[in-house]
Image (spheres, rainbow, N blue to C red):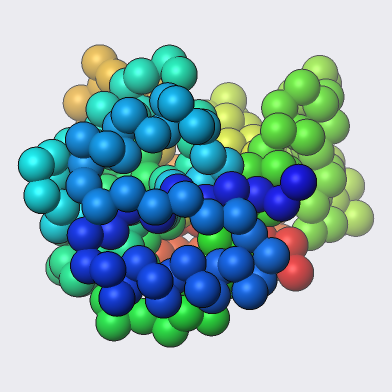
């Protein structure tokens, strides 16, 4: 069965546009118009991905995202936010709540389909590498048992923090990680460093990877992502 997408959108015309284009691309779709129904439907008929508008009646989209990510029954459902809020702070806030991607209105229906497909593909790659002991991508081999990173030029000498970073990036290619998410995942919630700390570690990791460091991309004003496989 094709992936099922739950569309959470209060504007019927936009919802119909999304449903039509996703169904044409082979996806199954479901649709609700407000945040309260979205929370109920996500548990009742668990989708493979949620397209979530932020400006919703009853329960705001940001709150919906936070509640979904805090619920063990729904925390692993990928979320792509679709919203008119285009400010950098809104993109960062959405990503830090656990959203997997962020699309601003007005949007191209083709772009939405491509982004949804990319997130689902990335999630599948993440599941495949979750229990693996070896990750290979873009000419980089990460041996989790030996705690070693190799390229065609030989082994790369990384610190423990740099190894955690490259492993995190490689397990979720294409996903944008904000600096705060990286600080939380790598150093823990009790860490009170500054943004520049992350930038410094990423810069050193890139330098050590040499030509392969180009695959760690900067998302200006937000954070970093590891280039997805083409």
Residue lying at 41% horizontally and 76% vertically, measured from the top left: 17
Q: Position of residue 126 (x, y in %)?
A: 67, 38
Image side of residue 124 versus residue 174, left or right: right
Answer above or below: position of 24 versus 68: below
Q: Give the answer, above or below, for where 24 lies relative to 171.
A: below
Q: State the image coordinates of residue 68 (x, y, percent, origin top left).
A: 33, 30
Left or right: where 189 falls relative to 123: left
Seen from the viewer's position, the closer of residues 96 and 53 is 53
Residue 5 place in picture, x, y as percent: 52, 51
Q: Which quadrant would residue 207 be assigned to in this image? A: bottom right
| The quadrant where residue 15 appears | bottom left
Compare residues 32 and 163 and report the one nearer the observer.
32
Kindly tell me whether residue 8 is visible in this rendering: yes
* Residue name at image x 13 percent, y 45 percent: 60
Q: In the picture, which quadrant includes the C terminus?
A: bottom right
Vertical placement of 109 versus 122: above or below?
A: below
């Amino acid at each position: 069965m094709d992936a099922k997408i739950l569309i959470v959108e209060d504007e019927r015309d936009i919802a119909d546009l999304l449903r039509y284009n996703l169904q044409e691309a082979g996806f199954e779709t479901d649709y609700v118009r407000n945040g309260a129904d979205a929370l109920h439907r996500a548990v009742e008929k668990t989708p493979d991905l949620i397209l979530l508008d932020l400006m919703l009646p009853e329960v705001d989209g940001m709150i919906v995202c936070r509640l979904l990510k805090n619920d063990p029954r729904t925390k692993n459902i990928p979320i792509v936010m679709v919203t008119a809020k285009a400010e950098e702070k809104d993109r960062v806030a959405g990503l830090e709540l656990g959203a997997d991607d962020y699309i601003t209105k007005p949007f191209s229906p083709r772009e939405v389909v491509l982004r949804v497909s990319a997130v689902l593909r990335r999630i599948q790659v993440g599941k495949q590498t979750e229990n693996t002991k070896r990750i290979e991508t873009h000419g980089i081999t990460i041996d989790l048992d030996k705690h070693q990173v190799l390229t065609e030029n030989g082994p790369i000498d990384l610190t423990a923090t740099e190894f955690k970073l490259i492993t995190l990036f490689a397990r979720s290619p294409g996903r944008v990680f904000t600096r705060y998410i990286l600080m939380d995942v790598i150093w823990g919630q009790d860490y009170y460093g500054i943004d520049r700390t992350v930038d410094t570690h990423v810069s050193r990791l890139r330098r050590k990877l040499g030509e392969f460091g180009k695959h760690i991309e900067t998302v200006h004003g937000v954070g970093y992502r590891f280039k997805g496989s083409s």
